[in-house]
Amino acid sequence: MTRLFVPKERRAHEQRVAATPETVAKLKELGFDVMVEQGAGHDSLCSDAEYEEAGARIVPPGDDAWSGAEVVLKVAPPDAHDEEDDEIARLGPGAIVIGLLAPHADLARVRRLAERGVTSIAMELIPRITRAQGMDALSSQANVGGYKAVLLAANRLARYVPMLMTAAGTIRPSRFVILGGGVAGLQALATAKRLGAIVEVSDIRPDVKEQVESLGGRFIDLPEMESGEGEGGYAKAVGEDFLRRQREILTHHLKSAHAVITTAQVPGKRAPILLSSEMVSVMKPGAIIVDLAAEQGGNCELTEAGREVVSGGVLILGPINLPATVPLDASRVYARNLLALMEHLRGEDGVVIDPEDEITGAALLTHEGKIVNPRVAEEAGAERSAEEPS
């Protein structure tokens, strides 16, 4: 029976958990021996008693569960939180670790996983194909982020979001501009519309227009639009000339906006700058920008990750890890993503790692002592070459 371990997350402000009592019960049905670290689900409102009722063994903090596990399910990447808590060192050689591993953000960590002989699967690398939809953790978590971004903006606005007709007169609805019509952007659009806002959406992918309009939003057309459709349905990086023309058009819409939600990200690259300081300067005092790309450098030139910035009366929020602020439901959907992947990996004699498989091969980061993802391997090699003295 394959031993599977769910540790308590130790990254600062991470409140999600990689398995819920619901998914533990189903993992048990699949034949896994599930161990859950004591208190792992506390911040996600999943008690140890509920895990035990679902069939998990509750284990105390320590090295034994890590070293004895054949599969470790994580949210945040395994990391060295202090000298005595090095999660990578705790992993047994040949272990499989699965989570949101931020493969492009810390190449030294990826190299350590390879050197340790750990097989790692990055949920960010799951391909966006039909049969992998249930495993798409980026989409499930982006949904949460888009929803919460609108609530953050609404909470900080000095005005109502919906139109109100009162005995004292009519209050006009707030205007939201959303930059990026991917999963997070469409969820932000739907949430803002539910609150009664007028919503406009800009995206470099023309095909997004139909989805925006179906949700009641107004699509901001960009003349002479080049396709921004990238591999697997993600946005791709576009040229600086196109971004300049896009900013000129957006500036007109920003003048009347009360809130702006930015969501544009390109996998493995710095987020594109969509809002320059000059564009922010035309916005109304009291307007709010919520930059969901803050951790990737930000879509706004003035964004500072994890901080609030005020410029000309405009409040710019750079939240980090928004899904973790909705830990119960974010954990529910993420745990189901992992369950779907484990169902895919399960073979007759345990977990099967097939690098030739369309899903497994795409998400595989390290395996048999090597970095096997071609792009990450190239980046890691280039970084190491730059560090070595000539």
Image: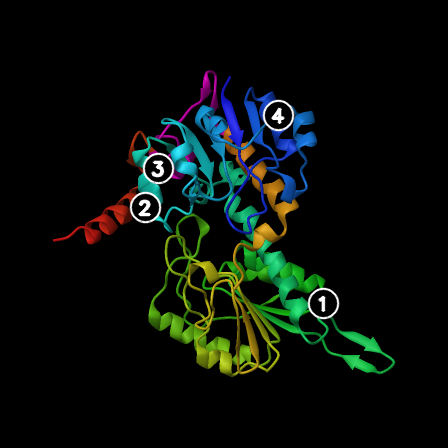
Q: Residue 208 carries which label?
A: none
Residue that label 3 marks: 113
Task: Confirm or deny contact between disc 2 and disc 1 (CB under 8 A).
Answer: no
Range drawn in magenta: 343-366
* First of labels 4, 3 by sequence position: 4
Q: Which mark is residue 196?
A: 1
* First of labels 2, 4 by sequence position: 4
Element at badge 1? loop
Residue, x 68% and y 35% (percent of image)?
A: 47
Say if the magenta span includes residue 347: yes
* First of labels 2, 1 by sequence position: 2
CA separation in Å, label 2 and label 3: 9 Å
* First of labels 1, 4 by sequence position: 4
CA separation in Å, label 3 and label 1: 48 Å
Residue that label 2 marks: 108
- Examine the rendered structure and indicate whether residue 195 appears above or below residue 359: below
CA separation in Å, label 1 and label 4: 44 Å
Task: Name the amino acid type tagged 4.
Answer: Ala
Task: Confirm or deny contact between disc 2 and disc 4 (CB under 8 A).
Answer: no
Percent of width and height locating residue 108: 32, 46
